[in-house]
Image (cartoon, helix red, strand yellow):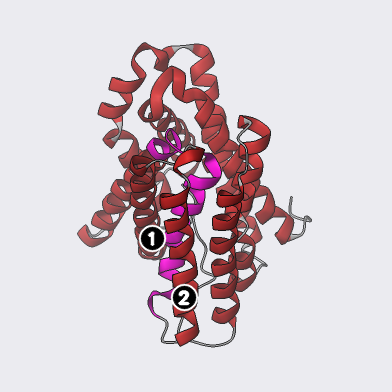
Amino acid sequence: MRTAPPELLVLGGIGSVQFGAALADKLFDDAGPGGVVLLRLVLSGAILLAFARPRLRGRSRPDLGAALAFGVVLAAMNWSFYEALARLPLSVAVTIEFTGPLAVAVAGSRRALDALWVVLAAGGVVLLATRGGHHGVHAAGVALALVAAACWASYILLSKRVGRAFAQLDGLAVALGVGAVLVIPAGVVQGGDALVRPAVVAGGLGVALLSSLIPYSLELMALRTLSAYGFGLLMSLEPAMAALAGVIVLGQALTAVVALALAMVVTASVGTTLMARSGPGSVGGEPQPEA
């Protein structure tokens, strides 16, 4: 892995996240979105806590508060995304959720051109919401995906604060533990006795590895040598990779409406990232953790 090109590591992380989401979708019939979220956070949190062994003693209240808020946002982001995924095709859910980091990327910009990327991305979401109803796209799923997008934006902002306060993955390990506790009620209600079935637990472990531990590790290694600009440009491929995973794993058709909306959001992301490189005024290209 240390000798692999960083671009290949990022692409591997993107593929891992999206195929992990597709695997999660296949578990919903057994454990529901809440149950799958619980398994993902509990298993990934337990593994990361064992490796990171974060120390909380001596931490200031603001630092602990930031880690707690990080965990709350993490729980809300994963739960709302999986609830959206239960109601939408994978490519649609990811495309809508991707507007969260896009909003962060252009939030501080004063360029008039960046308004074009906002309009383009918003147009893609509106197209999905108004023209996608005949292709499995429904209002409740769109609303939940937008909640996930808002949580993803908050996650990016909080990750900077937590990253400064905690060494390496300590803050993420704490947040995963907090998030796991918060989703216990929804997980138990929806998952029931499925949460202790070996096949479901094994699937949950696969989701935890594919959606959390593997991509976080690959991105961490890639960012040692890859610029934030390069990372942001590659991350623009998230919706396209989601569409591929949906077709291969879930057999979901990629309709013309969904393809057009996906292209609009990807173009907006690429445009935002390219503009971020040309000068100050935007935070585009920052690492973007995935739900």
For residue 74, say whether it is visible: no
Q: Position of residue 30 (x, y in %)?
A: 45, 17
State the image quarter where residue 80 is shown: top left
Could you tell me what secondary structure mostly forms the magenta stretch?
Answer: helix
Numbered circle sitting on residue 283: 2
Q: Position of 88 compared to 1: left or right?
A: left
Numbered circle sitting on residue 265: none
Q: Under tag 1, what secondary structure?
A: helix
185 or 24: nearer the eye? 24
Q: Contact, CB < 8 Å: mark 2 with mark 1?
A: no
Tell me the residue that label 1 is attached to. 153
Q: Residues within 10 Å of mark 2 (few under 14, many from 20)?
A: many
Which range is magenta?
Answer: 82-108
- Distance between mark 2 and mark 1 Cα atoms: 12 Å
Of labels 2 and 1, earlier in sequence is 1
Furthest residue in direction left, as rendered: 61
What amino acid is at disc 1? Answer: Ala
What residue sits 59% from the left and 81% below the top? 277
